[in-house]
Image (cartoon, rainbow, N blue to C red):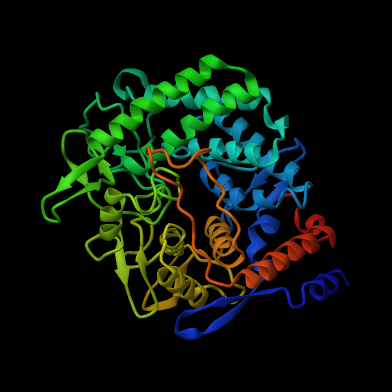
Amino acid sequence: MFKTLVAVLLIAQTLIVPLTGKRTRSIETASLFHTLFHDFFPEDDETTYVQTGDIPAMWLRDSSAQTVPYVRFQAEFPLLRRRFAGVIERNARAINLDVYANAFQADYHVWERKWEVDSIAWPVLLAAVYVRETGDTSIFTPELHVALRQVVHTYDCEEHHASCSTYRYPYRVYTDDRYNPDTGLIWGAFRPSDDPVQYRFNIPQNVIAVVALRAIAELAVEGYHDADLARRANAVAARVMTGILRYGIFYDARRRAWMYAFETDGYGNVNLMDDANIPNLTTLPYLDWSSSYDPTYLRTRAFTLSMDNPWYFSGRYAQGIGSPHTPYGFVWPLGIIGRAITSTDDDEIENSITTLAETDSESGLIHESFYPDGYWRYTRAEFGWANALYAELLFRSLAGMPETPFVRDGAVLPFEERTVTPTLVSPVAQLDNTAALVRTLGELLYAGRDAAINQQP
């Protein structure tokens, strides 16, 4: 009876998605809220556990990135605030348990202890986005205050890894341990893909650290009147930003262009590549580091989205960035989404959405990666992070919803504006799509489905 009720309520709740060749495809609006209703679990300690799709663990990065696209709906549905605040609180508690761990189980036991510079940045960005959107000060708990201090201390410490850090990974992985200790950059062990770094300073991870540190300065003052924490956060952010501009940008003689490096050792050696996992070089405007018109970014983007990038692959059904984390030659929908969400070109966005719409699962869900000459060969049937970011892309391009900024006033780089994603449909269609999305979310929340699905994992 319950399933029948939900099915009736959701009849005709679709978006008409423009594809290449003047084709269209309808997408069920409910699929865009899949991760919100299948991966978020309220816990007895009044936190929210978020598993990353089909893996029973909560990544600090994934859980925060899965939440951000839906914060925009809290004004229409205030009951969502408790769920989102629960994610912030759980991640704060996890950071305080082990700041170097990147993933945890539902009982807070560490699932994986890979030090990834961006891992502790994402929960900060979620907290900043949430406060700006809601004005809800209830998230400023003692746990979050301690976590913010932990993040600043850890970034400061890892700037001086050899003399300060006690982090050791339990088994040996290949990486180049030679690095310049005086760059101001933050030392890392693993990339956002969970793979070991080649050179210790991963530039996209340092970029998101700067964005997070600036957010900490805001949160410290607004939530805790902690001017000392704000000062320390801004000081570390300034050093890291200087390091990025000095060591993270290099002159590529082959292309005769200044470009961002993916990784560097601070001695002039660079790893010139891009990985589909975010943060990466392609999504610097999404992270509010630069605009999509920044010359250095554009030259870098031309490289990352070409066959010169050793992890860019092309096939019959798709082309895009892959990752050493999955089989060689596989492309990641997350990389295709990252390309589209930072594009200012209608055709590029339409091409990306067409690829995503034609290679997703039968239920409209997004895979982790797939073989571009045979999209039915894929890894992970359900990737929560990719599902959420795909929803973000369609919220922007089909419903005209504004971007959710990570930085309060424009981009981090001076005199650069935040990138605005173009819309692909008329203003009337945008209004219709917005109405359909809001109606679907309301029906899912109030038809009882929320209680039925959100059980203990």
State whether residue 108 appears in this view. Answer: no
- Describe residue 392's horizontal placement relative to residue 239 as left or right: right
Residue occupying image coordinates x 20% and y 32%: 178
Q: Residue furthest right?
A: 1
Q: Residue furthest top?
A: 228
Give the number of callouts.
Answer: 0
- Describe residue 353's horizontal placement relative to residue 329 as left or right: right
State whether residue 207 appears in this view. Answer: yes
Residue occupying image coordinates x 66% and y 69%: 433
Locate residue 330, reporting x and y percent: 37, 67
Q: Is residue 441 above or below residue 269?
A: below
> Where on the picture, by quarter, is residue 7?
bottom right
Q: Is residue 235 above or below residue 438?
A: above
Q: Is residue 64 above or below residue 292?
A: above
Q: Quadrant of the N terminus?
A: bottom right
Locate residue 214, reporting x and y percent: 48, 30
- Describe residue 265's horizontal placement relative to residue 368 as left or right: left
Residue occupying image coordinates x 35% and y 30%: 240
Locate residue 176, reporting x and y percent: 22, 38
- Describe residue 5's horizontal placement relative to residue 401 as left or right: right
Query: Which one is in front, 148 or 194?
Result: 148
Locate residue 111, reporting x and y percent: 53, 42
Q: Residue furthest left?
A: 253
Query: Which one is in front, 253 or 364?
Result: 253
